Amino acid sequence: MNSPKITFIGAGSTIFVKNILGDVFHKSALKGAHISLMDIDETRLKESQLVVSKLMESAGAHGDISCHLNQKEALEGADFVVVAFQIGGYEPCTVTDFEVCKRFGVEQTIADTLGPGGIMRSLRTIPHLWQICEDMLEVCPDATMLNYVNPMAMNTWAMYEKYPQIKQVGLCHSVQGTAEELARDLNLPYSDLRYTCAGINHMAYYLTLEKKTSQGEYVDLYPDLLAAFERGDAPKPKDSGNLRCENYIRYEMFKKLGYFVTESSEHFAEYTPYFIKPNRPDLIARYRVPLDEYPKRCVEQIAGWKQEVEEYKEAEKIEIQESHEYASTIMNSIWTGTPSVIYGNVKNEGLISNLPQGCCVEVACLVDNNGIQPTKVGALPNHLAALMQTNVNVQTLLTEAILTENKERIYHAAMLDPHTAAVLGLDEIYALVDELIAAHEGWLPSWVHQ
């Protein structure tokens, strides 16, 4: 069997490249893949090349590596296109998103999915994703795009609308990552879990969550999970990673809604109007909301990346365990025909009946040599769909804004954002959007500044 060509756009994200391609090199059918790395930062591109070459050698992979500063050149003849970049980076754009909003009294935690930060990030990102689609149509029209760029729902929706010919799926690790957390909170092996999940990215819910008994039957885990929370046994303290981000918001919402949400508490805090309010430090303390989490995380990660890359430069071999990311599983299934099931962000074409048709939804997908095939869910519980709709409203208006170059819809998107509307009046929302646009001079499409 021939080997595929895998193009990685945003390959300067060395640690992410290491994780995704480390997974790829664990798949025997992909060990001969041609790895095409592309980034606009030549120094970081060379660092990634070094890491990938050592990964290949350690895993017994035998494909070629090519490095490119030119996107179309990197895409030529690709079978798979992994996209992972952040337009504007931590500095200046993430800093701008947080500082401007803070001056208006809008506190944020992550700001990469919804709210003023998510709106600005989407406006500066979608044109670049469209250019990738344009180049793919020219030089690799049959390739499958695996998109990891946030804000996932708006980015994916905009690409489906403008480039319906492109095979694509939006990928996140919140579904499988949260399931692993829940297994740990319940002192269960992850392999004993069975679940179904559906919704929108960062606000999907486990519609069923079950465990396998010693008799081989499956029983509902939700009563056990609620009891563990009431006893104080869940959520468990994190054994690694960021200790600032405790998980109480999701458990509190679980108590109220009866279903557990996929994305972390620090994310979820800013998708709703309940947790971050002016002059309510009691709510911040009670729910342990980590304000300004993403800027802190960026500073730590940048420093960590530099240290890790230096260690990799010195290492003779780089051996890593497989991660829980879906990219390599998808590539392997499409390339070999071996079926798998992943959770992907796709166009809602009759998949979830009580969310708007055409919006971006996150559902289970069968993957084989027929490609990515989403599964039909039907109707979600109405209270879950209603909560998701508050987020879909923002996604709808921002997607319309950029597709039609209608600046007024940017303001409307901000008006409908649940968190922003809970903090600011109408005139203040318009003023905030104006100041964010002015501060993003050079990063947004020209029509936004007119």
Image (cartoon, rainbow, N blue to C red):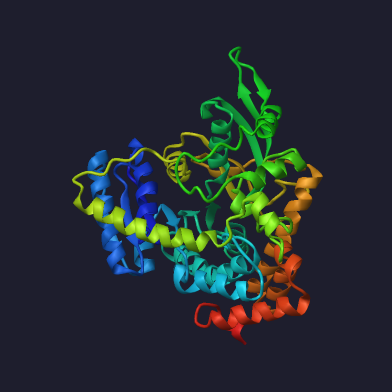
- Vertical placement of residue 423 versus 50, above or below: below
Quarter of the figure with the N terminus: top left
27 or 385, which lies in front?
A: 385
Q: Specify whether 286 is left or right of 242.
A: right
Give residue 108's position: percent from left, percent from top: 61, 63
- Vertical placement of residue 362 versus 307, above or below: above
Check the image and name the residue furthest to the bottom. 450
Task: Residue at 40%, 62% (x, y): give it.
Answer: 10
Check the image and name the residue furthest to the right. 382
- Vertical placement of residue 335 versus 314, above or below: above
Q: Specify whether 70 is left or right of 248.
A: left
Q: How many marks?
A: 0
Q: Specify whether 446 is left or right of 311.
A: right
Quarter of the figure with the C terminus: bottom right
- Vertical placement of residue 270 versus 22, above or below: below
Give residue 49's position: percent from left, percent from top: 27, 57
User: Is residue 441 among what the camera can see?
Assistant: yes
User: Is residue 6 among what the camera can see?
Assistant: no
Check the image and name the residue furthest to the top. 215
Task: Residue at 39%, 53% (x, y): give it.
Answer: 16
50 or 112, which lies in front?
A: 112
296 or 268, which lies in front?
A: 296
Give residue 249's position: percent from left, percent from top: 66, 47
Give residue 392's position: percent from left, percent from top: 71, 58
Task: Residue at 69%, 51% (x, y): give it.
Answer: 349
